[in-house]
Image (cartoon, coloured by chain):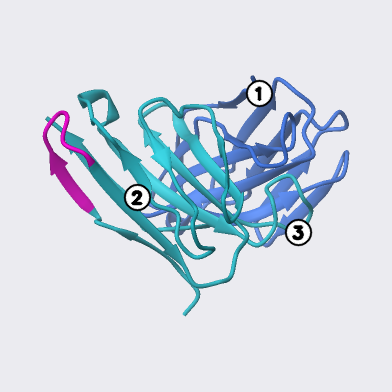
Chain colours: A blue, B cyan
């Protein structure tokens, strides 16, 4: 079945440093979604990427979708303590439009 | 307020005792889904429903049942819980299917289940 691998599993940064997490799918996706989960909270939708090679920005966050629609990345510039949490990618539409396959998540810790 | 509501938030139960976790959304969403979250494994989809009376298996359906008798509710049923079903469970809903454009999932607050 469809698998989505996400690395790294953990990332510790000093406040102000950049951060990147990567996702790779075993199948071509119709879209990829990114979610953030604060400690003790629930996943919250950040963005959806649909087009091949798409790049979207949200303030300090930059999201990319690969040309083959099998990989994606999230880059945060100049991290802040409010960025702490787990970032998940989720691939959709590879085998069924109803399935959403999450990566393992990257736990981001930001040291002040 | 638009939301997905799960109950209970915390549950400790014994092996074999049937239980139901409820999920309700007030956004008139067609699509609903259940996930379990375990350390190092991310969220894994258990079951999903694309409409009333339409349900389908996700990646880890064994040991679970669901029903979708009305649009707003999507309960998760564990007929005979076992310790390996100890996990954090999330219900989610969206207006469109995950594979469609302009979709986003809204998650409930989670249910932490412990089976002893």
Same chain for the residues under marks 3 and 1 in the image:
no
| Residue at the image point whose x is 58% and y is 70% from the top | B28
Numbered circle sitting on residue B95: none
Does residue A10 belong to the magenta stretch? no
Same chain for the residues under marks 1 and 2 in the image:
yes
How far across and down, in percent of the image, does residue A33 sit? Answer: 66, 46
Q: Is residue A40 among what the camera can see?
A: no
Secondary element type, mark 2: loop
The residue wearing badge 3 is: B102
Circles 1 and 2: CB atoms closer than 8 Å: no
From the viewer's perspective, tell me whether residue A38 is left or right of residue B97: left
Structural crowding at the residue carrying mark 3, measured as other residues with C-alpha within 10 Å and reported as few (<14), some (14–19) or many (≥20): some
Question: What chain is tagged by disc 2?
Answer: A
The residue wearing badge 2 is: A39
First reached walking from the N terminus: tag 1 or tag 2 = 1
Q: Alpha-carbon distance for marks 1 and 2?
A: 27 Å
Question: Residue A73's quadrant in the figure?
Answer: top right
Q: Alpha-carbon distance for marks 2 and 3?
A: 27 Å
């Amino acid at each position: 079945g469809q698998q989505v691998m996400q690395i790294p599993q953990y990332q510790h940064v000093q406040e102000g440093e950049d951060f990147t997490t990567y996702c790779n799918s075993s199948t071509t996706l119709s879209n990829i979604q990114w979610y953030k989960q604060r400690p003790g909270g629930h996943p919250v939708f950040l963005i959806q990427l649909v087009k091949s090679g798409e790049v979207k920005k949200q303030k300090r966050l930059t999201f990319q979708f690969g040309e083959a629609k099998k990989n994606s990345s999230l880059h945060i510039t100049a991290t802040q303590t409010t960025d702490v949490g787990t970032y998940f990618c989720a691939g959709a539409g590879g085998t069924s439009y109803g399935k959403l396959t999450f990566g393992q998540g990257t736990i981001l810790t930001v040291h002040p | 307020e638009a939301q997905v509501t799960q109950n209970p938030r915390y549950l400790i139960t014994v092996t074999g005792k049937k239980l139901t976790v409820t999920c309700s959304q007030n956004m008139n969403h067609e699509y609903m889904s259940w996930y379990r979250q375990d350390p190092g494994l991310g969220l894994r989809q258990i079951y999903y429903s694309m409409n009333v009376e339409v349900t389908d298996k996700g990646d880890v359906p064994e040991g679970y049942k669901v029903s979708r008798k009305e649009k707003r509710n999507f309960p998760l049923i564990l007929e005979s819980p076992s310790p390996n079903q100890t996990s954090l469970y999330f219900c989610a809903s969206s207006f469109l299917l995950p594979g469609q454009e302009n979709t986003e999932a809204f998650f409930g607050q989670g249910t932490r289940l412990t089976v002893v």
